[in-house]
Image (cartoon, coloured by chain):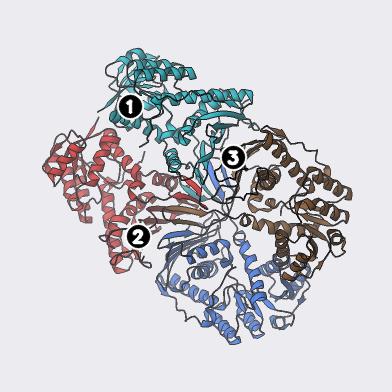
Chain colours: A red, B cyan, C blue, D brown
Amino acid sequence: MTLNFGVIGTGAIGREHIKRITDKLSGGKIVAVTDVNEEAARQVVKQYGLEALVYPDDKSLVNSENVDAVLVTSWGPAHEQNVLNAIEAGKYVFCEKPLATTAEGCRRIAEAEMKYGKRLVQVGFMRRYDSGYVQLKQAIDRNEIGEPLMVRCVHRNPEVDEKYTTQMAVVDTLIHEIDVLHWLISDDYKSVQVIYPKKASRAHANLKDPQLIIMETKSGIVIQAEVFVNCKYGYDIQCEVIGEDGVAYLPEPASIVTRKGAKRSTDILVDWKDRFMDAYDIELQDFIDSIVKTGQPNGPTSWDGYIAAVTADACVKAQESGQKESVDLEEKPVFYTGKITVQ
Amino acid sequence: MTLNFGVIGTGAIGREHIKRITDKLSGGKIVAVTDVNEEAARQVVKQYGLEALVYPDDKSLVNSENVDAVLVTSWGPAHEQNVLNAIEAGKYVFCEKPLATTAEGCRRIAEAEMKYGKRLVQVGFMRRYDSGYVQLKQAIDRNEIGEPLMVRCVHRNPEVDEKYTTQMAVVDTLIHEIDVLHWLISDDYKSVQVIYPKKASRAHANLKDPQLIIMETKSGIVIQAEVFVNCKYGYDIQCEVIGEDGVAYLPEPASIVTRKGAKRSTDILVDWKDRFMDAYDIELQDFIDSIVKTGQPNGPTSWDGYIAAVTADACVKAQESGQKESVDLEEKPVFYTGKITVQ
Amino acid sequence: MTLNFGVIGTGAIGREHIKRITDKLSGGKIVAVTDVNEEAARQVVKQYGLEALVYPDDKSLVNSENVDAVLVTSWGPAHEQNVLNAIEAGKYVFCEKPLATTAEGCRRIAEAEMKYGKRLVQVGFMRRYDSGYVQLKQAIDRNEIGEPLMVRCVHRNPEVDEKYTTQMAVVDTLIHEIDVLHWLISDDYKSVQVIYPKKASRAHANLKDPQLIIMETKSGIVIQAEVFVNCKYGYDIQCEVIGEDGVAYLPEPASIVTRKGAKRSTDILVDWKDRFMDAYDIELQDFIDSIVKTGQPNGPTSWDGYIAAVTADACVKAQESGQKESVDLEEKPVFYTGKITVQ
Amino acid sequence: MTLNFGVIGTGAIGREHIKRITDKLSGGKIVAVTDVNEEAARQVVKQYGLEALVYPDDKSLVNSENVDAVLVTSWGPAHEQNVLNAIEAGKYVFCEKPLATTAEGCRRIAEAEMKYGKRLVQVGFMRRYDSGYVQLKQAIDRNEIGEPLMVRCVHRNPEVDEKYTTQMAVVDTLIHEIDVLHWLISDDYKSVQVIYPKKASRAHANLKDPQLIIMETKSGIVIQAEVFVNCKYGYDIQCEVIGEDGVAYLPEPASIVTRKGAKRSTDILVDWKDRFMDAYDIELQDFIDSIVKTGQPNGPTSWDGYIAAVTADACVKAQESGQKESVDLEEKPVFYTGKITVQ
């Protein structure tokens, strides 16, 4: 069986997913596209030689009989309505982050999905599909390091441009840690605090960089998360979990080692696009395979989108207040408690 | 465009490739299968839900109009004839190693292919598609360590059963190093010598294990290759290239690091199937993509199959003589000199 | 020239230093000992075959003409008076930590020393003599990673007994980081905060363990220090400095690597005594050599002892308040501003 | 008790040992010096402020009542006679390598020593005192990797001057591996073979570089030793032992790790003098301590000097013949079979 995709938004990431489904993955096909710029949509169909119709708007696309699943890669503010439309039409949705720009929006999507009665939505948090995080979670779940007590993670970019603001350190950067960490340690956030170290001289005038975000979970695990987006030396994602019996570390990307010029060294990536490339493939293949085999997606849910939004809001508040802020999550509905298995 | 495959041989590796093409890769489809045990072939079609016809023999399969490319996963002694039949029918062939059981057989295939006038054949040496070897080759080709002078490589298995003989250390095990190393350092073998260290007590009565194979290339590079198939601790593939200016190492597979029980440690694989899993996918996807885009396969050629066979023969001779033995390769035909680019 | 030592306190650490000076180091000699238990002192002279007189009390020992330098290894509460007596007698003093049990006590020692007009005192903070910290400091001082912005350090012990209290995490454990870090980054502390993660189940009823201590310096560098004294897996000291241009890490102790049982691993120390063994030797040899060559000791000063005491007090206050507490250090007198060079 | 040293030869290495004994070690004292250039000897006494007499020749020095132990740091050709004189006078001798310039010379020394009836001589092979080799030997002796089957070692220097010849790769460079390896694996050499890889373009006209020396022991262990003295990138000593159950590696020198400029890297030493600096200290301290405590030295014996000489001769022969050459060692006398314990 082939899963027929309709794509809303044919910008950079939309085109990448189109290419991925068409050239690399198995079992999916692009049959419909739409974009606020219809000409752009038309261009994409031509460029990739798709057998796909161009629709004038998302409503008509999601309602097309041909479309089994909707890929939401429009701009952020449109996500909520795109997803709600798809749910209303009873279509599967793969929505790039954010699920909605507000926690309330995410909540509305979860409500709509629960009302529909079946999980349709997967949010594009790809790190859960990275083989390193998967290994790390398996080690934790097998109790190899005992109960987690602390987590330390690092998210560094070589540089950012002038449009990047202090708040984006949370909503664009830390958001990936927010999602992957609660999944990793099977816990929920309780409070957050933001500490600003000495500012990097390379950081723009109105950007506080680096930032330390201290997050506490309901069971008391303390997470030290560093965001440093002008670190210069590379794109570097680190994560270590300190448990009762030991510590486990996210693997470094495999790279050749050299001995040269009085140094033993390994390359560090510089472009974030290279870091989770495989995870993007596995994520979408899993979305296709899960639906084909089980009738529903298996990845991050609408509720995970809601958790990310509420937690990010609390972090932004803590950025401004300098105080510890609580993360006020509603109780997770039973609808969303099914275990997610990464294969 | 979809590349339609006919599969000769539906044993373990045949089924794996069928699954790979059907479930994971893009652009290929299984449309025909055959097996000496026709019932087994029928079973596979059913098991994987293939839209494929079962053919009574390889001849009828390769001649089917529906078949664009032939996947040879029959038992070794049948390979030569399977491949020759496919070439005669003007079909692309992906042939698992060995291309033929004798150097002469490989030579006949190359002749047939040259006569046909276009490269049709790719041999299943998957290591060239392993991201670690690709990185290593890129470093060498970019001259990062200067001219290679020596290579040291290690091929270790935890254990082998009683059927594994001294000679198989060459024809089943070292064969992968034989192929990948001459590609890696862009050189040809000149002579080989085999040294037997102290025998591992776990090695069976009629198996000499470990073995050191010293290989010299035409330009004088000396390769120290260790085969140790009862090393107990894991499946371990190592390769380092010592150049004029530095040394480069094949990366270890990425794996979580732990601190636990007074040890800082990382897992070593134990099952060889896990080591080059990604390489198998990339190899077949590249076979498909190259043919679709350029009209011919881009991987190890019939001539590479011939080089492997001649070199393995010399190694077996050296195993028995205890002397340095020459590797008598014919001059490479211009037909096979095109550069192979791994994308 | 030989530096003649008088030792106050012949307990475990006193005996170790006596052995060190007698058997391993060059240029020092034990000529006098005293202990509250005079018989114990006598015993030590006999056991190590010292040519040393036993004195009835510290006053008579420091005043002995024979004694050039005093080694204070009595119990903590006696240190202040021991050191003040030595200063009054114009003798060099090597005092194990703490210099005094209160910040005021340290202050009084500094006053006395300044009044005497020459640096006489060295405090036994040995980490500054560890070759790893020395390399780390050199890298920072050579500007290899740019201006330091953050520091992350870890101090883990496998376990502690019931006598170890929450406060000791600061005064006995973190105290080493407190000293070595301000030296490492050439900065002074401004404020501290303590966060308690989920408690380790192995920690005793009245011990909060692990603890995270966040320390901010005057220039804004933020230090994340973890103390975890029931980590089970080993004695583990980590330190990394995150600068504008890169990150530098304290080396792990050199240890053989093995490949065995499906693991590539290295030993982690379990006994703290093994970790800085060389540093103890270098520290005391430097004390001897500096005095012999330059007429004054070259290591951590009375003022460093004062900094440690004031900072530890602030940390203890922060342990209790849960708030950020200021570190109120007086301005450093010019007397103590001379650069310390590790040779 | 203080061990009084007489030094024969006050060149570079002689002066270093004098400084070491005087400034860093405990329990030794330089009381006598001699040099073929008497003025140079006089100079040294003055420069280091020694309380030492200058003797006109080695004979008078070794016979001085004041001298307990003789340090032979004269030029190589004089060693044999210096050592024989010392033995005749019943004095302890620490002799820098080579013990004698010929195997016969070493044999004569061993004879003289046996005739005297007590071990007096220690040869300056310092690697046995390197903490890395000691750890490696302990792991082997504790059977952590099972019976050793193979060893691979590497001895690389950044460059050598024009005076360095092909033969010196054995007698000056490999000689250290020759000594330390038979100690490490508790075995004796049986045969050697030399293979010349492609020559490094940086190697001088009459130097073959790199070289691979294959050494086989009596029990069948095969050692692959690489000597590469124009490797450019650093001074690099590697050693790994492959056993029945696992592999153990000599540790790399501890050095800070940095993340910088898209590289994670560690420094490699460039100057050989830095690599075994601590081992030189430990070696001489052990010589002093063993004599003081047990009445005889505990390090590499005259017989080890003989083994090194015979094995080096066989290697040089193999360099020239291109053949496997046997290492014809006489049976080790019972006199030399006592176990050496490194403390």
Left or right position of A238 against A246: left
Give the image location of residue C217, x and y in percent. 43, 71
Label 3: which secondary element: strand
What residue did someone put label 2 on?
A230
Q: Nearer the viewer, residue C153 or A290?
A: C153
Label 1: which secondary element: loop
Amino acid under disc 1: Gln
Between the residue at mark 3 and the residue at mark 1, the CA separation in whole angstroms equals: 45 Å
Label 2: which secondary element: loop
Count neighbours of disc 1 (C-alpha within 10 A) and say few if under 14, some if 14 to 19, many if 20 or more.
some
Q: Chain of mark 2?
A: A
Between the residue at mark 3 and the residue at mark 2, the CA separation in whole angstroms equals: 43 Å
Image quarter in which the N terminus of chain C is found: bottom right
The answer to whether any part of residue B164 appears in the image is no
Amino acid under disc 3: Gly
Identify the residue shown where x is 45% and y is 35%: B274
Image quarter in which the C terminus of chain C is found: bottom right
Q: For marks 2 and 1, give the one nearer the viewer.
A: 1
Quadrant of res A170: bottom left
Q: For marks 3 and 1, give the one nearer the viewer.
A: 1
What residue did someone put label 3 on?
D246
